Image (tube, coloured by chain):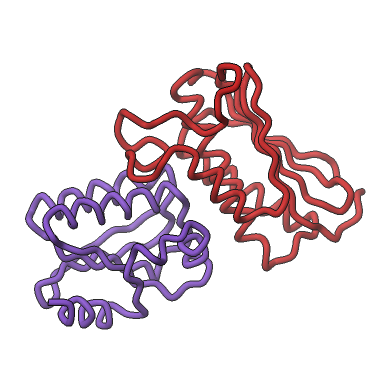
Chain colours: A purple, B red
Amino acid sequence: MDLKLGHYSKDGIEVVDVEGEIDVYTAPRLRELLIDLVNKNNYQLVVNMEKVEFLDSTGLGVLVGGLKRVRAHDGSLDLVCTQERILKIFRITGLTKVFGIHDTVDEAIAAKKAEK
Amino acid sequence: MATVEVTFTPLPAHVRTARLVATAVARRSGVDESLLDEVRLAVGEACSRAVEAHRRHCPAEPVRIEMTDQDERFVVTVSDHAPTAPGRQAASPKASDGIGYDGGSAIPAGFGLAVISGLADDVRVLSTSSGVSVRMSWPSTASSS
């Protein structure tokens, strides 16, 4: 499977697990999931990208779109990623300044709680 | 190394195939392992841009990729045949029908080309009335056969 998606709640925050490749072909599925979660009033999201093997600008667009949607409800979307190959595209595009990027899901959740 | 050419129907599903082929050919050409991720990403971006252009303007036409060694550089050229108006920017048109190449309007059109520029130190975009070619290259060490 090119892209595997899952999600669960933890401490009032919805964690989205992403595994595989996010590109022009698979990105629509992630987009649909993020839209669905927001439509179900989940505005505090953490996207775990530790098992993402590939991410291009289409995937970035989906993440930015998700961020915009939750921010419209005063929410937030943070990322979990330590892979340099994935972080590189965030750096090239300057999006490291837009997203909160953490080393683990627990760190991301703790950071969100600290913001409140 | 002889030129390797790939043509594929402009479907998003084929972009992955194109970048896998390009990565394999790059490795065979002697491109350093540390650069292969950049090759994969840059070729993927160029192909995604071409696929979107074809889907809008000429969905029956295939996208073409040409890979070759020139002067100790691995050169990839991704060409589309989507008609462009004279003087029009090579960036893909604004997405208005959903996901599009730019993720459904969250990322500006042309963002992919900007990403490519950050991944290859030699990028040239040739835009003519019959289409756009994106040429990228990376240093290689293998001599031509």
Looking at the image, which residue is at 58% across and 25% down?
Answer: B62
Residue B89 position within the rendered picture, expressed as x and y whole percent measured from the top left? 55, 29
> Residue sitting at 74 percent across and 65 percent down?
B32
* Residue A8 locus on image (x, y percent): 17, 68
How many discs mark residues in the rendered view?
Answer: 0
Question: Which residue occupies the foreground of this view, B39 or B116?
Answer: B116
Residue nearest the observer in this picture, B129 or B25: B129
Q: Left of A97 or right of it: where is B133?
A: right
Residue B65 shown left or right of residue A115 in the figure:
right
B72 above or below B89? below
Q: In this view, does A67 lie to the left or right of B14?
A: left
Name the residue located 50 percent from the left edge and 27 percent from the top edge: B53
Residue A48: horizontal and vertical position, in percent?
Answer: 31, 69
Q: Position of residue A71 (x, y in %)?
A: 18, 57
Q: On the rendered structure, is A69 left or right of B31?
A: left
Vertical side of B37 occupied by B7: above or below: above
Residue B124 versus residue B61 in the image, above or below: below
Q: Give the residue at x 32% y 53%.
A: A64
Examine the image and state in which quarter residue A24 appears.
Answer: top left
* Residue situated furthest front in the rendering: B87
